[in-house]
Image (cartoon, rainbow, N blue to C red):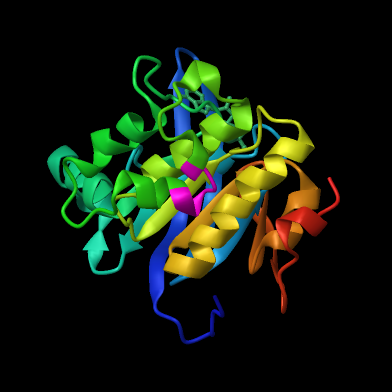
């Protein structure tokens, strides 16, 4: 989906810091991050391990709060929201995909997705969500009968079936080889294009960055560069 500079801003983060205290030791995970995410944009957050990528994504997704700074999601100020408001925000607006798929082993692909669609307001049918990620032929497979890449695509179907406004993916290909990982990135790319879901994808793999509209690089809890791409490289043409 084309993202114009006047697309509405979905997230506006300013001056984010995050300090984790472990006994005597303090770790500064974020050291003053400003970050915007525009509607329907696909952003890759790129950086080495420990650079603060997950911390930033978790704050955007309402799973964690910064030590200082502000995050605004559309007209909601997340940084002053209480736990209950953050829970509602996550439920109504955010789809998460993590490195490990967190599927329920005793449920089929269709049933894993239905767990979410049963409680959502305007969900897709599980079959529709699974078709979007190319798994129409695996509806009644259990997780143990699926490859790692297929399990991750079920997790993506589960994340998008409630039609979230934003999709946040933390190292979605981290546990996969590159051949399988491509299919997962293709599913994310397709969801972003077809549904216009605003998407952030974390990776430490620089080769993945070319699929993004914009690449935000983090080092030591700071944004070190922001790169815009006039055109996106299709996941199958990435070199990584
Ligand atoms: P990345 O996702 O880029 O690998 P993280 O955001 O997970 O980085 O972590 C940034 C830094 O914060 C790291 O040094 C990490 O050890 C530390 N950190 C992350 N989460 C916690 C936590 N819950 N408690 C203590 N330290 C943490
Ligand atoms: Mg991480």
In percent of width and height, residue 156 lies at 47, 43
Instruction: From the viewer's side, name the closer residue of 164 and 15.
Output: 164
Left or right: 78, with 1 as reference point: left
Q: Quadrant of residue 176?
A: top right
Q: Residue at x 24, y 43 (%)?
A: 117
Above or below, comparing residue 144 to residue 43 in the picture: above
Instruction: From the viewer's side, name the closer residue of 182 and 15.
Output: 182
Quadrant containing ligand 1 reads top right
Q: Quadrant of the N terminus?
A: bottom right
Left or right: 200, with 220 as reference point: left
In percent of width and height, residue 213 lies at 64, 69
Above or below, comparing residue 197 to residue 171 in the picture: below
Above or below, comparing residue 14 to residue 136 in the picture: below
Q: Quadrant of residue 29?
A: top right
Residue 58 appears anywhere in the view: no
Task: Please state the total of marks drawn on the protein image.
Answer: 0
Q: Quadrant of residue 233?
A: bottom right
Residue 127 appears anywhere in the view: yes
Instruction: From the viewer's side, name the closer residue of 94 and 29.
Output: 94
Above or below, comparing residue 82 to residue 147 in the picture: below
Left or right: 239, with 69 as reference point: right
In percent of width and height, residue 132 lies at 48, 54
Q: Specify start and end residues of the magenta stretch as a single range.
A: 131-136
Q: Is residue 134 magenta?
A: yes
Q: Which residue reaches farthest right?
A: 239
Q: Residue at x 66, y 45 (%)?
A: 183
Q: Residue at x 22, y 52 (%)?
A: 92
Q: Quadrant of the C terminus?
A: top right
In percent of width and height, residue 110 lies at 35, 35
Q: Is residue 125 magenta?
A: no
């Amino acid at each position: 989906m084309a993202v114009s500079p006047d697309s509405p801003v979905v997230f506006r983060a300013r001056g984010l810091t995050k300090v984790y205290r472990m006994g005597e030791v303090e770790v500064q995970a974020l050291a003053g991050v400003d970050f915007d995410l525009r509607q329907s944009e696909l952003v890759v957050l790129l950086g080495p391990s420990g650079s603060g990528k997950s911390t930033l994504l978790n704050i955007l997704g309402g799973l964690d709060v910064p030590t200082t700074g502000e995050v605004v999601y559309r007209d909601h100020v997340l940084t002053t929201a209480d736990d209950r408001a953050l829970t509602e925000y996550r439920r109504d607006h955010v789809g998460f995909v993590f490195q490990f798929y967190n599927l329920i082993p005793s449920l089929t692909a269709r049933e894993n997705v239905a767990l979410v669609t049963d409680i959502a307001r305007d969900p897709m049918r599980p079959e529709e969500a699974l078709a979007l990620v190319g798994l129409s032929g695996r509806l009644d497979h259990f997780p143990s009968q699926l490859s790692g890449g297929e399990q991750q695509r079920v997790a993506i179907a589960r994340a998008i079936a409630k039609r979230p406004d934003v999709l946040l993916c933390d190292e979605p290909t981290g546990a996969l080889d590159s051949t399988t990982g491509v299919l997962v990135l293709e599913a994310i790319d397709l969801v972003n294009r077809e549904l216009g879901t605003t998407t952030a994808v974390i990776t430490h793999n620089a080769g993945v960055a070319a699929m993004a509209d914009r690449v935000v690089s983090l080092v030591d809890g700071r944004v070190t560069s922001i790169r815009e791409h006039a055109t996106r490289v299709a996941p199958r043409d990435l070199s990584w």
